[in-house]
Image: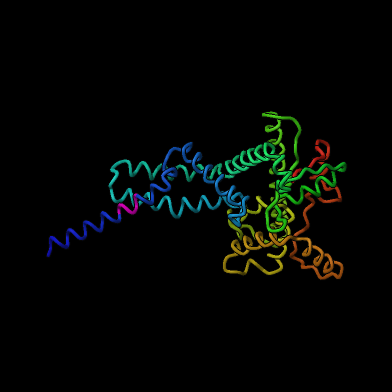
Amino acid sequence: YRNANSKSCSDRKATIVMEHMIQVSDVAHTCEHWTVYRKWNERYFVECCHAYRQGRAEHDPADDWYPSELGFLDFYVIPLAQKLQACGVFGPLGEAYLSTARRNRQQWEACGQQVVEEMVERYRLNYENSNNNNNKQQHQNASSRGMAFVQVADPQILYACLRLHHTHLEGRRINVERSAGGKGDKRLEKLQQLRQEQSQHIVSVVDGILQECYDNRSIQKGELDDGVVALCQRHSPAVVQAALQEYVDKQGRDMDNPSAYLTFLLGKMAVEGIRDKEEKEGGKDSKGGASSRNPKRSSYGGGDGGQDSKKKENGANPTAKQ
């Protein structure tokens, strides 16, 4: 009986180890060198983007690829690698796989957002080239390319358009960016420069909005964690402004998890839009009913020619791409 019990226990352990190995084989790239990890991560990203554009997925993977990958590494890959290392099946390689997964996690946290931007850019260019090659067939089928070029003469109109960057239109997140002429690598370099400038400008404006909240003490420092602050920097300043205003009005600091509540509001404002909310708040302000804790409204892309937009007008290429 003792031998039978021992054999049964050994078989059960072997079965568990085999299950762990099968699970690791499905995500083996996360335990490989950074270049290998990035290669297969991008291939999966492209598959998800194709599924979204073809209507087989409801969610745009570019919206949260960076934070979701962090969660995937933290709560699935690294614990799985720890189990393999503990069982000792791979000997010293088990420790190597675990340390590599942890290094990939650290590197993704440090530069993952830039990696995602590069993947989105490459996918967009490949998608545009594919559309250009099939332009006649698309025209015959009257199918939408999902993009448009808009040329404006007034820099103020241009920045009013740019204000819609990373907002939602009919349930889909849109990009509104300046375009550039030319072909080949020079055009790509110019587009990357313009997007980097726009991204840096958005981050600086969002940081200014948050700093105003800290200064007028409508939000206390440390009240929001770093994750939701980074998420704010990935949304348009108008969306962040509206979400913070509702967060303050609803006394989000008194909730069990203020950061989670603001995350919910950011998603809500991005999807539902802020135009109706701004009109309602404008009515309240005219009656003198605005809250004393309301943060100030951002000047990003506004029609009053704020300081931030004035700096951009001199070198602006009056072409916005949606």
Image quadrant holding the N terminus, namely: bottom left
- Across and down, in percent, residue 122 comes to 62, 38
- Across and down, in percent, residue 239 comes to 72, 57
- Residue 7 falls left or right of residue 16: left
Q: Along the line of sight, which residue is nearer the eye, 56 or 75?
A: 56
- Across and down, in percent, residue 174 comes to 70, 51
Q: Residue at x 82, y 64 (%)?
A: 279
How many numbered marks appear?
Answer: 0
Q: Is residue 1 magenta?
A: no
Q: Which residues are magenta?
A: 17-21
- Residue 7 falls left or right of residue 220: left
Q: Is residue 83 shown to the viewer in this render?
A: yes
Q: Along the line of sight, which residue is nearer the eye, 249 or 186?
A: 186
Q: Is residue 215 shown to the viewer in this render?
A: no
Q: Residue at x 70, y 36 (%)?
A: 191
Q: Residue furthest front?
A: 140
Q: Residue at x 59, y 41 (%)?
A: 119
Q: Tell me: residue 181, above or below residue 211.
A: above
Q: How is the image coloured?
A: rainbow
- Across and down, in percent, residue 136 comes to 72, 39
Q: Tell me: residue 178, above or below residue 207.
A: above
Q: For residue 190, what is the image quadrant?
A: top right
Magenta stretch, overall SS: helix
